[in-house]
Image: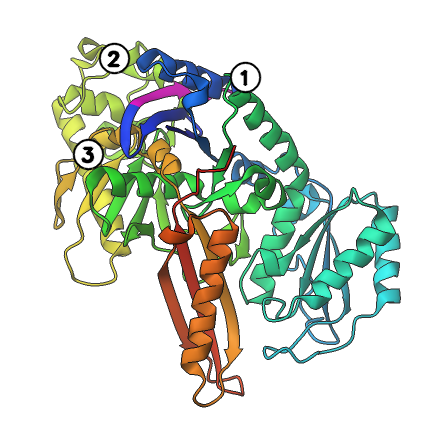
């Protein structure tokens, strides 16, 4: 059996899975220390379906801790950004396009050094070790313990990043945290560098959070391996999470979409995930969330690491309803829903109150919303339906029919039919789809690289890229017999010489549970 847990801003959801069957599902309020909310959720599972801790093969957790820390600019480590690229790239130094408040929050210091490669692996300039030692002295003098290293076209040739990391470790000691851009982002330099700096700023916090999550699980007597879910719906072990916290940023909506696929049996559809404060709308393609193809802005910073293509709107179960139903959200009572909403004895008219007043849901004490004006309630729900339908239409890339699946605790707000989109699927256990998505997550491996393809060698290069992606999935813990390529892109780059072609291959397989303990 597996346990899936999703820690959201309002609720902590947990499920106990026997294979792909939900044996128990529970929602508990997220607590400020997070760990006690997880403990309460585990106790809730025990009450629904008693199990012995030894029966659990693995625990998978999706968490919003890290992206919340970045948005709130809280708990971030002083960080140095070192770029290897001189004499090129000097016109746009590291951190150039960051919000100044965030730069101050990470105590950001930028350094430029010689190095870098062309797309085909040729050296731009040799590494200058004396120059890097001078940078190390300055980093030491400012008490910085986390360094982000980026190099031009390092996804093609990572040797300079690795060599620079070894030098900084020699100069600054083993306790310095090093984040290398070729392990985190894709080809584009500035976006890859930004993602690496964010990762470096979160390294200290990652240790603290991962230790807390592990403690909350072991406190229940569970000794099974613990995994965190990643942005692409696959898993990473806790040691990986300590080194790459940035990979968890979008695990919440990704888990919901993956859970929706399992519950509905639809592997290509739009998923509307309605929470307490916001709703996330994304598209599943062959069971996996469609990834954002370009840059993604996170807390005002452009990045290019793997993120799902998701649109968020400020409508959730706790959204305030004002102006006689003419406006719903984006302001929300959030986690205070159970104290401020009318159905729970509060004094604020929320979207949940309206849904209960119209008979769409049976939550709290419905007699407390008997006085809600029906016209107001209908206007509010019509407005919500129009907004959901509009966002789903914006996510479409073709005129082909696109089924809509509604999940999440606030999905009572989604009507049974959306204008122009037809019937909405609302599968069983929809309210804990995110925890189910975490529990059934798989393991992936990916290659994203620019190749110089000589005449007659295309098939060989493509085969090598696909095999490397599959090998990486197996190395990450996938069962070899289950690994398959689920995504493949091949894009010629006409402005580069040598028949340059960017190839992306992604392989996914089931987690090899045997031998994990």
In this picture, is 86 found above or below 382? below
Image: magenta residue range: 24-32
User: Mark 1 — residue?
Assistant: 219
**Is residue 405 visible from the viewing direction of this image?**
yes
In this picture, is 479 found above or below 467? above
Give yes or no for contact between labels 3 and 1 (Cβ–Cβ under 8 Å): no
Counting from the top left corner in percent of width and height, residue 159 is at 70, 67
Horizontally, is 420 left or right of 306 in the view?
left
User: Mark 2 — residue?
Assistant: 364
Mark positioned earlier in the residue sequence (3 or 1): 1
- Residue at x 50%, y 57% (from the top left corner): 472
Q: CA distance from mark 3 to mark 1?
A: 33 Å
Mark positioned earlier in the residue sequence (3 or 2): 2
Q: CA distance from mark 3 to mark 2?
A: 22 Å
- Residue at x 35%, y 11% (from the top left corner): 47
Counting from the top left corner in percent of width and height, residue 206 is at 62, 37
**Predominant SS along the magenta part:** strand
Secondary-structure class at tag 3: loop
């Amino acid at each position: 059996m597996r346990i899936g847990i999703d820690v959201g801003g309002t609720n902590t959801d947990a499920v106990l899975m026997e294979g792909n069957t939900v044996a128990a599902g529970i929602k508990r309020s997220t607590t400020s220390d997070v760990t006690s909310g997880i403990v309460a959720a585990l106790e809730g599972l025990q009450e629904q379906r008693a199990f012995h801790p030894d029966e659990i093969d693995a625990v998978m957790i999706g968490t919003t801790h890290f992206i919340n820390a970045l948005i709130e600019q809280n708990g971030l480590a002083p960080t140095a950004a070192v770029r290897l690229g001189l004499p090129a790239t000097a016109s746009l130094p590291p951190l150039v396009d960051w919000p100044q408040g965030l730069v101050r929050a990470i105590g950001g210091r930028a350094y430029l050094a010689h190095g870098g490669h062309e797309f085909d692996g040729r050296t731009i300039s040799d590494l200058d070790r004396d120059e890097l030692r001078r940078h190390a002295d300055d980093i030491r003098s400012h008490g910085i313990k986390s360094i982000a290293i980026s190099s031009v076209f390092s996804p093609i040739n990572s040797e300079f990043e690795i060599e620079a990391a070894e030098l900084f470790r020699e100069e600054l000691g083993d306790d310095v945290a090093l984040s290398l851009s070729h392990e985190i982002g894709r080809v584009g330099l500035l976006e890859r560098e930004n993602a690496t700096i964010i990762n470096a700023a979160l390294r200290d916090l990652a240790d603290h959070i991962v230790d807390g999550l592990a403690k909350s699980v072991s406190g229940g007597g569970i000794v099974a391996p613990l995994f965190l879910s990643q942005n692409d719906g696959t898993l990473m072990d806790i040691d990986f999470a300590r080194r790459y916290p940035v990979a968890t940023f979008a695990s919440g909506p990704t888990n919901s979409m993956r859970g929706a696929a399992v519950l509905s049996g639809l592997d290509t559809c739009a998923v509307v995930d309605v929470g307490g404060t916001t709703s996330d709308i994304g598209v599943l393609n062959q069971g996996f969330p469609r990834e954002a193809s370009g840059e993604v802005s996170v807390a005002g910073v452009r990045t290019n690491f793997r993120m799902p293509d998701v649109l968020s709107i400020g409508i959730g179960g706790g959204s305030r309803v004002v102006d006689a139903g003419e406006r719903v959200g984006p302001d929300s009572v959030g986690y205070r829903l159970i104290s401020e909403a009318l159905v729970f004895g509060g004094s604020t008219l929320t979207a949940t109150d309206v849904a209960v007043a119209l008979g769409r849901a049976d939550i709290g004490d419905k007699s407390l919303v008997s006085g809600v004006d029906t016209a107001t309630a209908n206007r509010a729900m019509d407005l919500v339906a129009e907004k959901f339908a509009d966002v789903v239409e914006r996510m479409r890339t073709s005129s082909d029919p696109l089924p809509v699946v509604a999940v999440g605790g606030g999905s009572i707000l989604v009507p049974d039919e959306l204008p122009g989109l037809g019937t909405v699927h609302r599968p069983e256990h929809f309210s804990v789809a995110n925890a189910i998505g975490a529990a059934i997550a798989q393991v992936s491996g990916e290659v994203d690289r620019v190749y110089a393809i000589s005449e007659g060698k295309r098939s060989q290069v493509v085969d090598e890229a696909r095999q490397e992606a599959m090998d990486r999935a197996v190395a990450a813990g996938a069962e070899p017999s289950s690994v398959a390529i689920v995504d493949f892109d091949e894009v010629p780059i006409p402005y580069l010489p040598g028949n340059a072609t960017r190839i992306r291959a992604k392989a996914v397989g089931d987690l090899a549970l045997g031998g994990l303990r």
